[in-house]
Amino acid sequence: MRVGSVSGRLSLFVNGGAIDVERTSEGRFDADPSAVYARWPELIDWAPTAAGEPQPFDAEELGPPSPRPAQVFAIAANYSAHAAEGGVDVPRWPAPFPKWVSSFAGPVGEIGLPSARTDWEAELVVIIGSRAHKVTADAGWDHVAGLTVGQDLSERDVQLRGPYPQMGLGKSFPGFSPTGPWLVTPDELDDADSLELGCSVNGEVMQQGSTADLVFSVPTLIAELSAVVTLEPGDVIFTGTPPGIGLTRTPPRFLAPGDELITYVKGIGEMRHTFTANGEER
């Protein structure tokens, strides 16, 4: 099943078109995409009976599959090769940091660059489908609504300034957390633990990796995070990025106005973003 947002309305994606859930269900489900996660098992049961005619849509109408999560977690250094390129040890435990919902954006559109040192980080993103607290890794997938594509865009000056890195702040400028194009339930994937992902800039491949190489897998992340916090339906986890970021290249390379960034996870889909100067120099 593929679920997401078209013009801010909860939609199922079938045969290249979109079915409006609120209209097709005659009001059983709210049009707000954020509201469905509290009733995720009900949607799973109802979706096969949806009899609406899929309607065409423009990619620019797509929004984040979970647009207003209560909690957003991102995981640092969760690929050993990415840890190595950054000169840090592979962590013994997950290294989470927050991202702010005000940075969320859809899978297609323009994003303003706050400086000349904005970097890309392609990621697999997890959306929680049922409350999880102190669950085991064996049960981790049971709490996943689905997976989507994400970018953890990073303004490196803000992120790295001062004695303590400002991971969340440097990665939460407007538009810096795009997700989409939709949520895909794990049963739709041949192997949800091994998905190719990556990104390109102006057609040049920058990152290409596999989630099979995650230091902490999706179910392990859910177990480790839920050992401390309670994960709620709709919460979002950015699982980490493979090697190939711009900061560690020689010379460093960053996004510039006019660049096109394509981010993908095979079996899920891709995002396309272009960048503009927003007049803020740092």
Image (cartoon, rainbow, N blue to C red):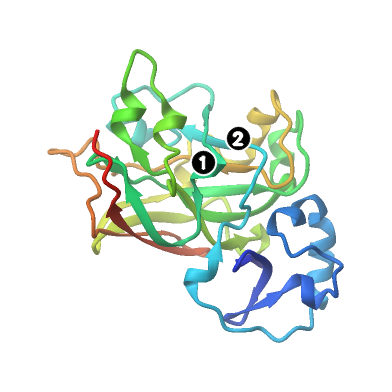
The kind of secondary structure element at disc 1 is: loop
Amino acid tagged 2: Leu
**Residue 82 x %, y %:** 35, 36
Q: Nearer the viewer, residue 243 or 237?
A: 237
Q: Quadrant of the C terminus?
A: top left
Q: CA distance from mark 1 to mark 2?
A: 8 Å
Task: Please say if 30 is above or below 234.
Answer: below
Return the residue nearer the eye: 222 or 32: 32
Residue flagged by tag 1: what amino acid is it? Answer: Thr
Q: Which of the 4 image quadrants contains residue 69?
A: top right
Cβ atoms under marks 1 and 2 closer than 8 Å: yes
Q: Nearer the viewer, residue 110 or 66?
A: 110
Extreme top residue here? 163
The residue lying at 82 percent from left, 54 percent from top is 39
| Residue 221 circle label | 2
Screen quadrant of the N terminus: bottom right
Q: Quadrant of residue 36?
A: bottom right
Q: Which residue is mark 1?
A: 239
The x and y percentages for residue 223 are: 67, 32
Asked if residue 72 can be seen in this view, the reply is: yes
Q: Residue at x 53, y 23 (%)?
A: 93
Q: Secondary structure at mark 2?
A: helix
